[in-house]
Image (cartoon, helix red, strand yellow):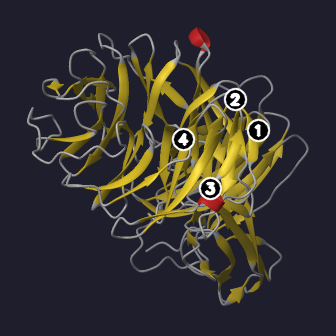
Amino acid sequence: MRLIYLLVLICMVGCSGGGTVSGGSPARPPGPQDLTLRMEISVQRSGIQASSTSAPISQVVVELVDPNSTDPGTLSGRRVVSQATASVGPDDSRVSVTLEAPPGLYDVYVFGRDSEGLVVAQATILQLAFQAGVRHVRQVILGGNLPPDVTVSQVRLTLAPSANLNVGETGAAFSALADLSDGSILDVTGLADYTVGDPTILSVNQGQVQALAAGTTDVTATFQGVTSLPVQVIVSAVGPRVAVVDSAGAGTQLFSYRLDPSTGTLSLLDTEPVGAAPRRMAADPVGNLVIVARQDDVVSPFSVDDQGLFTALPDLVGLTAPTALVAVDNRLYVGEDHTPLPTVVQAFELVAGSFAPLGGALTTVQSVPLDLALHGQSLFLTGNSPDNVRAYPLAADGSPTGAVLPGVATTIGGAGFATRLAVHPGGTFLVATSNGTPSNVATIPVNLGAPIDNRPLTGLSSQALALTPDGRFIYVLTNSVAARQIEVFSVDAAGGLTALAGFNVLLGAGGSARDLAVDPAGDFLLVTNVNQIEVRPINPDGSLGSAVVTPQPNAVELDILP
């Protein structure tokens, strides 16, 4: 068993000399402005003891990498800017490698491989500035313990690029350096034991950090019984993405924003042209898809990533007046207005980046589709005749069966018709609004029996509907000649409604407020109001706070993307 002590001397110079290149070449051709990084690696036959299970190191691989990149094909998992290898013979006491790269900030990964090519030891040097006139000397140990005559004076712990993280972030990493009694500095990032004050907030694995939950916690690193000073890490919650579509004719665009969960402000992430003014917009529950039904009878789907960046998917064409949408689990249901003929609902499934028909079209017994909702294997549809709400069963794959469930909701708005529809989070009843004289909000069992409760609305036209995630409060956006407003109701677990008229919010006279939604945490209500987006805090009693306003000309539909 060879005793392994790897001493890495890193010398940055502004020339191409220095050291003997051994087994390896840069990952890309060097340029005239490149600088040279010479690494002299000493493999001493005494000193650091390899563990009894470690295989002898027969090769050293050094990767100079871009710290803000990924590449699963490299040892480090990062994009390699320059790489070199050196063989370690049985009698070798020193090997050297040379890497060339432009000036910049890099991470250095040093790997020890056994004779079968397996990585048996690893060390890292993080955030290394590569510039002319700077000389760095570091010691890197690949496995084992310190010699008995060398002790650790202190351990210094730093976190890069920042100690302020967001939930889910994985790009930050600790660097642990041990000051040794012989005057040298040892990178012990991969050897130290890390202690996290609150492991529900943060996890650390060989220096790599994953932010798990919002909060503040301290982290320390211990090597050879010496513990670093604590580093305080602040993890902040990441707000949801918000998709908004405007109504600007051929110039219509789709916007994505990030909602700040502490202030309610919106930050623009991306824009994407849509091509025609929208009728409706929908998003899938997990926030991977946004679908816009256009007034030119085209449905435009978009994928959206975690950063809110849109990618246009192939349009769905050949539809007739698509006015109702619902999406779930890569499936899309589109209600088409075939007035005076009954509504047709078509189902589609996302396959290889485009939507393909899922089963045959469903011809309903209703006309003028206004909203769709899914619950279990039932598809619910609002229309203006002959019934307000109908349910249509779906096959196991989500395709329509063509049948009509026997339960039929009674008219919930006098002589009017149902408009908007949502499934209560409890899953036992629906919440629906209607237009009529008067307009109403009602709760209806999912088996479509008689309404559980029914309350009049102040406004003449119910435009949009949103529920808090806990199901306690209902917000209805209404428009009338005199005013547009948000009307507030509480709802109990059985479906009983209470009007909270004192909490209603007037949005102004004239113009039109088009849509509203509640964020997944239930902290904010968002509404598109004429030429702006309003974000209003939701108080514990269901009342709404003052609006944080983001100008958005011609804003119409919006959806929250978790």
Crowding at dot 2, Cα within 10 Å, few <14 / some 14-19 / many 20+, comes out as few
How far is the residue under mark 4 from the one under mark 2? 76 Å
Name the residue carrying label 2: 510
Where residue 560 appears, x then y in whole percent?
Answer: 53, 45
How far is the residue under mark 1 from the one under mark 2? 69 Å
Where residue 295 appears, x then y in whole percent?
Answer: 45, 14
Q: Secondary structure at mark 4?
A: loop
Picture quadrant where residue 365 is located? top left
How far is the residue under mark 2 from the one under mark 3? 25 Å
> What type is the residue that disc 2 sits on?
Gly
> What type is the residue that disc 1 sits on?
Thr
Q: Nearer the viewer, mark 1 or mark 4?
A: 1
Crowding at dot 1, Cα within 10 Å, few <14 / some 14-19 / many 20+, comes out as many
Q: Secondary structure at mark 1?
A: strand
Crowding at dot 3, Cα within 10 Å, few <14 / some 14-19 / many 20+, comes out as many
Query: Which one is earlier in the sequence, the residue at label 4 or at label 2?
Result: 4
Name the residue carrying label 4: 23
How far is the residue under mark 3 from the one under mark 4? 59 Å
Residue drawn at x 23%, y 47% is 409
Where residue 407 appears, x then y in whole percent?
Answer: 14, 48
Residue drawn at x 74%, y 64% is 163
Name the residue carrying label 3: 524
Q: Which residue occupies the extreme right position in the image?
A: 133
How far is the residue under mark 3 from the one under mark 1? 54 Å
Q: Secondary structure at mark 3?
A: strand
Q: Nearer the viewer, mark 3 or mark 4?
A: 3
Name the residue carrying label 1: 36
Q: Nearer the viewer, mark 4 or mark 2?
A: 2
